[in-house]
Image (cartoon, rainbow, N blue to C red):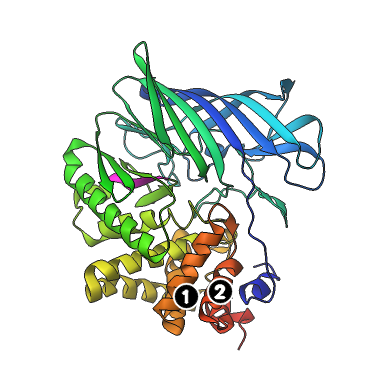
Amino acid sequence: MKPALALVILGLISISAWGTGAVYDLDLHVDFFHGSFTGTETVTYTNPTSEPLYELPFRLYPNSPYLYGDGTLSVDSATVTGTPVTAETLGDGTYLFVPLPAPVQSEGEIVVRFAFHGRAADWRNGRGKSAADYGIYAASPAAMTLAEFYPMLAPYDPCTGWVLDPVYQNGDPVTSASSDYTVTVTADAGLTVLSSGSEVGTEPVGDEVKHTFVGNDIRDFMLVVTSGYETRATAAGGTLVRTSFPPSHHQAAARAATLAAEALALYGELFGPYSGTELDIVEAPLGRAAGVEYPGLILVGESYCNNPYDQFFTVIIAHEVAHQWWYAAVGNDVIDEPWLDEGLATYSSVLFLEHKWGKEGDSFFSSWIDYYRRARAQHPDLSVAAPVPLFPDSSTYTAFVYYGGAAFLDAVRKRIGDTAFFAGLSSYYRDLSGRIAHGYDLISHLEAACGCGLGDLASEFLLPAGERVH
């Protein structure tokens, strides 16, 4: 843990939320049956720094040996404002540095264009080849999941500079600024294409169909292509909930749509209105994850769809829908402060169980608290607010970040009461949507709502044993 973090957590100093996004224009051609694609990308960005820029850092996340399996993403060419440049791929292949032909001054505009191609990890014979593969960038016989399929501009933090964290074996990989997207996807007719954006048009192109999607102020752009799935849409208040599941799992699809509608309504009441107009829920053969969140789109692991009336299926949907507030809308650095979205999403699912089942839902939360307490006793050097690389394994990560984060929020709620607690979360959501927040932002909003100090609780949960204030 960084030495200054203790002061930040206890509210003694402030870190400003941030997040300057870009404008992406992507044109993709998908070869579903070979699990590959080619594309072009234009990124328009304004220099957010006070100094001239000489290069721009991008990320090629699918090249990581962790989480993305044996998939690849390669850049074929790059230009800056029409001038060809030689972009350099470094490290584990996830870092791409684009030199600028001339320095770009503060607030100057930069236009970068790429041609690229990629291949998703091969899941056509079951699980991927790597035990560390989530299945988020994978080609199976019925679904092609394409997380981070394009060169992504690294976000710029005005306090620390470009955010260039490695991809680790645990947790989520991507910290990104909310940006605007226009994406065209050409794929064989008969395939279903779902994305983080809203589909605004289709156009037949021979035996294929070109789909056009638009998404404004979204944190990243997820794409899923399916074959043989049933896709159905239902209205849930002002949100269109769309499910795409195999016909054999039609009960899971219906159950997911019902639960998502209930969660959207509850979270909208507790935290503030959902920031989107659509929400897609797609079954996928995930590994090491029961569900994965993206802006406007949720993946649900196929193994959990065999019994959609199991209580854990409810937890999956409730948790991933909550990420539309905590991650998709209010962002955070998922490497340095993973608890901020995962703890909030986990406690939001507790609130959903409380709403739906009353005391019957307590057993899940009680077991999670016990799991956290055991991990805390075994690892006194760790805390809820520890960064990803400090956790030795996924179970320890889950215990502190998910369950410990939820335990902290529950302790705050019991201390300050429901009125102040939900007022604090609502103002945090309202003020930080579209930005990258820090733990201090959450604590300061809760303290403002209750008119009290929460330093002792922050110390108890968010600092390791040797740094706690007594």
Above or below 298: residue 181:
above
* Residue neighbourhood size for the residue with mark 1, other residues' Cα within 10 Å, grouped as few (<14), some (14–19), many (≥20): some
User: Can you see residue 300?
Assistant: yes
Assign a secondary structure to mark 2: helix
Quarter of the figure with residue 280: top left
Tag of residue 408: 1
Assign a secondary structure to mark 1: helix
Outermost residue, top side: 206
Marks 1/2 in contact by CB < 8 Å: the verdict is yes
- Under mark 1, the amino acid is Phe
x and y, in percent, of residue 368 in the image: 36, 71
Most foreground residue, 464 or 42: 42
Most foreground residue, 329 or 191: 329
- Under mark 2, the amino acid is Leu
Outermost residue, bottom side: 470
User: Can you see residue 382?
Assistant: no
Residue at 61% x, 26% y is 75
Quarter of the figure with residue 105: top right
Residue 119 lies in the magenta stretch = no
Residue 298 lies in the magenta stretch = yes
Residue at 52% x, 74% y is 446
Above or below 212: residue 131:
below
The residue labelled by disc 2 is: 462
x and y, in percent, of residue 111 in the image: 68, 29
Residue at 57% x, 62% y is 337
x and y, in percent, of residue 386 in the image: 57, 66
Tell me how many marks there are: 2
Above or below 55: residue 320:
below
x and y, in percent, of residue 260 in the image: 29, 53
Tell me which label, 1 or 2, sits earlier in the chain: 1
Q: Magenta segment, which residues?
A: 296-302
